[in-house]
Image (cartoon, coloured by chain):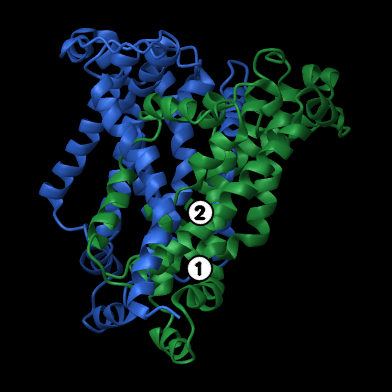
Amino acid sequence: MLSYNTQKKLLIFSFLAIPLALLITFSFYPAVKLIYYSFTSWDGLSNNYPWVGLSNYKSIFTNPGLFGAFGHNFSYLVCGIIQNIIALYFAIILNSKIKAKNFFRSVLFTPYILNAVAIVFIFKFIYLDTGALNLLLQHMGLGSLQQDWIGNDSIVNWSLAFVSMWEYFGFNMVIYLAALQSVPQEMYEAAKIDGANKWKTLIYITIPNIKGIIQINLLLTISGALEAFNIPFIMTNASPPTATFLTNTMNVAFTFGNYGLASAMAVVLLVLVGVVIFIQQKLLGGGRDVV
Amino acid sequence: MNDKWKNAIWAILKYGSLIIGSLIVVFPMWIALINSLKSNQAFNNTGILQVPKHLDWSNYITAWNAGGLGSAFLNTAFIIILSVAGNIILGTMVAYVLGRFQFRLKKIIMAGYLVVMFIPTITTQVAIFGVIHTLGLFDTPYALVLLYLGTDVVQIYIYMQFINRIPVSLDESAMLDGASYFRIYRSIIFPLMLPASATVTILKVIAIYGDLYSPYLYMPSTNLGVVSTALLRFEGPFSAQWNLILAASIIIAIPMVLLYLFLQRFIFAGIVNGSVKE
């Protein structure tokens, strides 16, 4: 038999070869390629990659239809932050002494497991002009709140962002719940002896103890909002009033065959996500040891 | 205000918000269910909020046949089985190496997986598309299998938490008996990590099952449709037949609901065990 030292080298190499090959081929190599394409006017098919310098980047910032789509991402950002607050609130409730805890947890998590296309179709039906939501409002005596949820350009993005909130808050909640369960019980007992009330316990013990996970969740929420794609793509076919930066990017590439510009847009998005991470690290610090 | 009153108000607030939250979650699913069970005539004549007098299953049969859902399920199952099996093997291998050995590059590899988490996968499709074409896998299920095969930072994290709690003394006593490192992986580490693999499997299955964009982009042929793309195709030809579209949506939702009902303890236990200890 080989010595353990030789075995170790052999094993590390053979066990990591395929996973690292996949990581490089499908994550790092495409990211590098993307940067290269962004300086060309490649059409996605030919073997020429005509160098165009920074002109793709110039078009992104001068063409309001492209960069302006981030305005539509804004509603996803706001709903994402609300989603985290609701998720944390429910996690705290479910972490207290409560009946039917598992039942409520299971119900609230359910949307996360449903197929995204099915969810969007169901909401499209509910949002119809004569749909369930407007009928329900009428029955509740709130008829004045009835809206054309999809047809009205000024609210459609909020209707779409709500679907995202509905789909994902249960997932955030379960992550928060897991973090809450790892807060040492002795700390709560000590606080109780010192006479701290529920509110003080929350502010001084619970929140500081799960700060890292709040940051990670917020980070994923913000980058998720910048990258909103699925819901407008399925619900409205990413029509102009609902187009997000990412649906525009994919449209530029796969509908208009302008891969160079699309790559530049993807790079801009990557840089923005990077900036968000950087700001969050600088502002709030820590959180790095979590993952 | 005395404590009794405080507790009562707190209880009303707690249960009240849980019930409202649950109603908001259940309402869309309930509306979809009752309307999918209405015949065309009943759908046109009864209110959307009303439960049908007779349960009519014909939408389910029509949706199944017209939408080609049978072959969509088979295609999806094929892709899920191949990619999840490979994913578990590769994920446990990475976790074994990173969790048990010290070597140069270890930190760099971990950082590499972390960085990748923040690259939005949809943006890099432009470049991945080229890779898939070069490999000759365009419009085959293997394109998706390859894309889903790789492990990611969440899985590595769940596995690493788990492997750190498997005593190293088990490895050492196996070594005294002359077991090779590969043998230790195969006979000790892999079997002991099965509960973590169950969590990883469920999360991966949910992700693959719900993925729309990869199959939409890499497998455009109708006969290769997976559940997401098959459902998406209902929009054109059946766009006015909401009872049919809702039936199809519910058919697509059922397998994950069943999986969730029977295996949810693995989801929650796995996430709790893999969670932060700061």
Q: Nearer the viewer, residue B80 or B129?
A: B129
Q: Residue at x 54, y 63 (%)?
A: B197
Please tell me whether mark 1 sits on a helix, a strand or a loop. Answer: loop
Q: Is residue B41 left or right of residue B177?
A: right
Q: Is residue B119 left or right of residue A19?
A: left
Q: Position of residue B91 (x, y in %)?
A: 46, 59
User: What color is chain B drawn in?
Assistant: green
Can you tell which mark lies on residue A15? none
Q: Is residue B116 left or right of residue A169?
A: left
Dividing the picture into quadrants, the one containing residue B209 is top right
Tag 1 subunit: A
Q: Local crowd at mark 2 within 10 Å, few (<14), some, or many (≥20)?
A: many
Q: Are marks 1 and 2 in contact (CB under 8 Å)?
A: yes
Q: Indicate the secondary structure of the residue bearing disc 2.
A: helix
Q: Position of residue A98 (x, y in %)?
A: 50, 68
Q: Is residue B48 visible?
A: no
Residue linked to disc 1: A98
Quadrant including the C terminus of chain A: bottom left
- Residue drawn at 68 percent across, 44 percent down: B77
Q: Which chain is blue?
A: A
Looking at this view, name the residue that lies furthest to the left: A282
Q: Mark 2 belongs to which subunit? A: B
The residue at the point 46 percent across, 22 percent down is A232
Amino acid, disc 2: Leu
> As displayed, is residue A278 above or below residue B7?
above
Quadrant occupied by the N terminus of chain A = bottom left
Q: Is residue B136 visible?
A: yes
Residue A219, given in percent of the width and then of the height, sits at 28, 45
Say which amino acid is labelled 1: Ile
